[in-house]
Image (tube, rainbow, N blue to C red):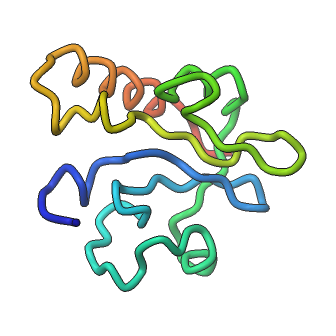
Amino acid sequence: MLNNFFRINLPYGIIRNDKGEWMAFNREYMPLGYNDTEFKGRLPIAFEDKPIWTKYKALNEKTLLAISWDDEEGVRRDSAGKIEWVFFYNDKSNPSASKLKSDWDAYFEKIKCLSNFKKA
């Protein structure tokens, strides 16, 4: 349920479309800032025509694995084995539900890493 700032506005992960562009999504699998659950669970199809996708330089598999919560469980791959979804945390490491400072630190390290990527 979208009930707080974290779940609505901070990224749970990123998803790639068929054009190699990326979009950040919130905990309810909607673009950041979306809070209308009518769109829930419709990634990426419901948002293909929205200007929320960006192609980034040097966003490679090594980096994608580094920002996922786990090298393999924190990503989803397409039929060709290419990463198309990256999740920054799971239920156990969810910073907003955790009392551990280390969960917040790990999350923000991922966000800092992403902030360095430039638009292609």
Name the foreground residue: 60 vs 40.
40
11 vs 47, left or right, is left
Q: How many marks?
A: 0
Residue 117, x across and y down, in percent: 55, 33
Kindly identify the residue that appears in the image at 72 percent across and 29 percent down: 60
12 vs 43, left or right, is left
Instruction: Tell me: residue 42, above or below residue 3.
Output: below
Quadrant of the drawing holding the C terminus = top right
Image quarter of residue 109: top left
Give the residue at the far bottom of this rendering.
Answer: 38
Instruction: Tell me: residue 71, above or below residue 3.
Output: above
Kindly identify the residue that appears in the image at 36 percent across and 56 percent down: 26
Instruction: Tell me: residue 84, above or below residue 23.
Output: above
Give the residue at the far top of this rendering.
Answer: 102
Residue 57, x across and y down, in percent: 68, 36
1 vs 44, left or right, is left
Instruction: Tell me: residue 12, above or below residue 74.
Output: below
Residue 77, x across and y down, in percent: 74, 44
Kindly identify the residue that appears in the image at 48 percent across and 32 percent down: 114
Kindly identify the residue that appears in the image at 49 percent across and 40 percent down: 87
Quadrant of the drawing holding the N terminus = bottom left
Residue 103, x across and y down, in percent: 25, 21
Give the residue at the far front of this rendering.
Answer: 92
3 vs 103, left or right, is left
Image quarter of residue 100: top left
